[in-house]
Image (cartoon, rainbow, N blue to C red):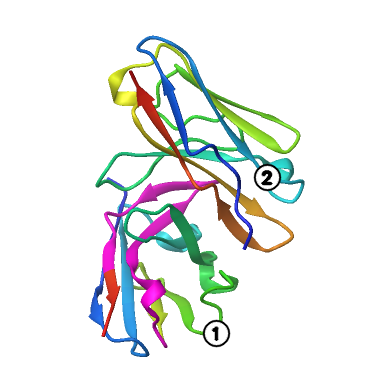
Amino acid sequence: QVQVVESGGGVVQPGRSLRLSCAASGLTSSSNDIHWVRQAPGKGLDWVASVSYGGTYKWYADSVKGRFTISRDDSKNTVYLQMNSLRTEDTALYYCAKENNAFDIWGQGTMVTVSS
Amino acid sequence: QAGLTQPPSVSKGLRQTATLTCTGNSNNVGYQGAAWLLQYQGHPPKLLSYRNNNRPSGISERLSASRSENTASLTITGLQPEDEGDYYCSAWDSSLSAWVFGGGTKLTVL
């Protein structure tokens, strides 16, 4: 069964860093674009970043550009989101989603809380 | 990044028809159409349709999507209690090189 599983969330102080992981199983993640989408408590969905199959192309939301870096290790079927200079407004549930014309497979999410 | 516009809430009676709308511009909805997702409280979103009216396997035929210029619509016929939830639209914005979402519509089945 195709699934993606996120990990790496936690509580971190403003200005610190965190790395999220998205492990894909039941498919070859290298054949799909993979995305990170976040949802602040009680709010809507907010696209964060995407990486193309092979890792050649990467896209970022303006709100995270220069602070977050998306990457993938196809040998491990895993996509990463390195988050630096975290802010309180980055507090959210971070979802990993596979794309096949749209976000068709979602994980359960990993919670990131940025607080002093 | 500018998002797509959805009404915050829609309420309809059991077995009635609800039409949800999602308005963007020629760079996103008007470019490649929109996808629709449903999210139940405490769960990840689930894809309902993409590129206007392509449904993944297992999605009810009571749902149909369409697009008119820069506005996408999702019509749900014969409303059931399980149709209650938060509906989001999404689209790729070719001008921003970014994915954009609508703010979500909470559908209540009375």
Distance Cα–Cα, label 2 vs label 1: 27 Å
Q: Amino acid at mark 2?
A: Gly
Instruction: Name the residue tied to disc 2.
Output: B24
Number of numbered discs present?
Answer: 2
**Left or right: B80 in relation to B70:** left
Q: Residues within 10 Å of mark 1 (few under 14, many from 20)?
A: few
Q: Is residue A81 above or below residue B26?
A: below
Q: Nearer the viewer, residue B82 or A87?
A: A87
The location of residue A104, given as percent across then percent down, is 43, 45
Residue B30 appears in the figure = yes
Residue appearing at x 37%, y 90% in the figure: A15
The location of residue B96, given as percent across then percent down, is 69, 63
The magenta segment: A85-111
Residue appearing at x 32%, y 82% in the figure: A18
Label 1 sits on a secondary structure element that is: loop
The location of residue A67, given as percent across then percent down, is 49, 84
**Left or right: A68 in relation to A116:** right
Splitting the image into 4 quarters, where does residue A71 fall?
bottom left
Residue A6 appears in the figure = no
Instruction: Name the residue tied to disc 1.
Output: A66
Q: Residues within 10 Å of mark 2 (few under 14, many from 20)?
A: many
Q: Is residue A48 above or below residue B69?
A: below
Q: Quadrant of the N terminus of chain B?
A: bottom right
Q: Nearer the viewer, residue A38 or B5?
A: B5
Q: Amino acid at mark 1?
A: Gly
Label 2 sits on a secondary structure element that is: loop
Chain containing the residue with disc 1: A
Chain containing the residue with disc 2: B
Q: Quadrant of the C terminus of chain B?
A: top left
Splitting the image into 4 quarters, where does residue A6 fall?
bottom left
Residue appearing at x 56%, y 69% in the figure: A61
